[in-house]
Amino acid sequence: MNAATPPHSTWLHGAIARIEADFQRSADTHLIPLNLPTFAAHGIDLYLKDESTHPTGSLKHRLARSLFLYALCNGWITQGATVVEASSGSTAVSEAYFAKLLGLPFVAVMPRSTSPEKITQIEFYGGRCHFVDSAAAVYDEARLLAAQTGGHYMDQFTYAERATDWRGNNNIAESMFTQMARERHPIPRWIVVGAGTGGTSATMGRYVRYQRHATQVCVPDPVGSVFGQYHRTGDLTLTDVGSRIEGIGRPRVEPSFMRTLIDRMMDVPNVDSVAAMRVLSSLLGRRVGPSTGTNFIGMLTLASEMRTAKQQGSILSLLCDSGERYLPTYHDAAWVEKSFGDCSAAEERIRALLA
């Protein structure tokens, strides 16, 4: 005889079912081969997995789904509870989408510098934006708001790597390797992924070890982020000023950033990220975001090193989100000049690598 269904289970089961149905309606994202003859002639192929095509427009759609399922199954989110998140924007957009799907109030705590397009999207999904003056202030403010509302602080920076299953269930790494099956170098030499929480790099690192692949993981890290220093030293107390490349890099060491799963860190100047964003946008015929520019710098650096060493193989990375979110900022020449200075020399240097 089956035990009686606990009173809370009806809502919980319905919430999980709605999230799973949303996933079932989604097709996988496309893996784009980059047309770069200068590298292809040497047996080096570069690919970008286009995560901008998710319903909420970025890689963070996967993370938000995983975080909601993790919190629901742990009993942390209950019917009517307010969900609070600390975010630079993209995760909050995706979490607002899932909160609306479940009929839950949502509050995003974010720096005032967050792009207006992301703020508009969060509000479109019924979320409320709560602004702080610096990226370092988002954590305590989010905890305070969750306590005041009796809700749940999602805390992507702690739970991203735990919530994401690297063996199955929405596994981006498994998807990438499946999509590579018919390419000339199906097992990539490198996977390049920037770190915001560290969840995706942890997923990649665990997956390639679990599958016993020879693939290595590289994390390009923007100026002002603490991740590179932490990877070199292992000092959990390190802090920095914070990244100015929206979506990646952090001012403190996040619990989700697993240094032991990363084979190489790469420090990337801001002007290089913006310049690479412009070059890649031109190459693809559509705008990409600045964090994808950071990834592209990492890919080109590795490809150039492989070419010099006469090595062949493939390099995979992510197109994190669309550049349409950054039209008044990273894609505005005057804003870039004021924020970062002249990027033209960096852009010429990157274009020369592709000549």
Image: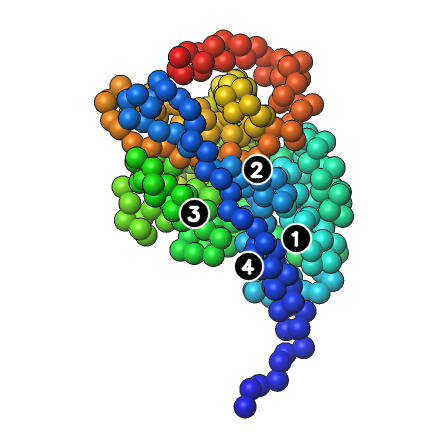
- Is residue 169 depicted above or below 132 in this figure? below
From the top left corner, tell me how far across and down residue 316 is, in percent: 40, 35
Q: Residue at x 47, y 10 (%)?
A: 348
Tell me the quarter of the picture where residue 354 sits. top left
The reply, left or right, for residue 353 in relation to residue 336 is: left
Q: Badge 2: how crowded within 10 Å, few (<14), some, or many (20+)?
A: many
- Quadrant of the image for the C terminus? top left
Per the image, the residue denoted by label 3 is 175
Q: Badge 1: how crowded within 10 Å, few (<14), some, or many (20+)?
A: many
Per the image, the residue denoted by label 1 is 98
From the top left corner, tell me how far across and down residue 185 is, in percent: 30, 36
Q: Disc 3 or 4, which lies upstream in sequence?
A: 4
> Mark 2 or mark 4, which is nearer to you?
2
Judged from the image, the secondary structure of the residue bearing numbered disc 1 is: helix
Q: Disc 4 or 1, which lies upstream in sequence?
A: 4
Give the distance between the C-alpha atoms of the residues marked 1 and 3, in whole angstroms: 22 Å
Tell me, for residue 52, which label it has, or none: 2
Q: In the orientation shown, which residue stands out farthest toward the bottom?
A: 1
- Quadrant of the image for the N terminus? bottom right
Identified by mark 2, the residue type is Ser
Labels 2 and 4 touching (C-beta < 8 A): no
Labels 3 and 4 touching (C-beta < 8 A): no
Q: Disc 1 or 3, which lies upstream in sequence?
A: 1
Q: Badge 4: how crowded within 10 Å, few (<14), some, or many (20+)?
A: some
> Mark 1 or mark 3, which is nearer to you?
3
Identified by mark 1, the residue type is Phe
Q: Disc 3 or 2, which lies upstream in sequence?
A: 2
Per the image, the residue denoted by label 4 is 70
Give the distance between the C-alpha atoms of the residues marked 2 and 4, in whole angstroms: 23 Å
Give the distance between the C-alpha atoms of the residues marked 2 and 1, in whole angstroms: 17 Å
Identified by mark 3, the residue type is Ser
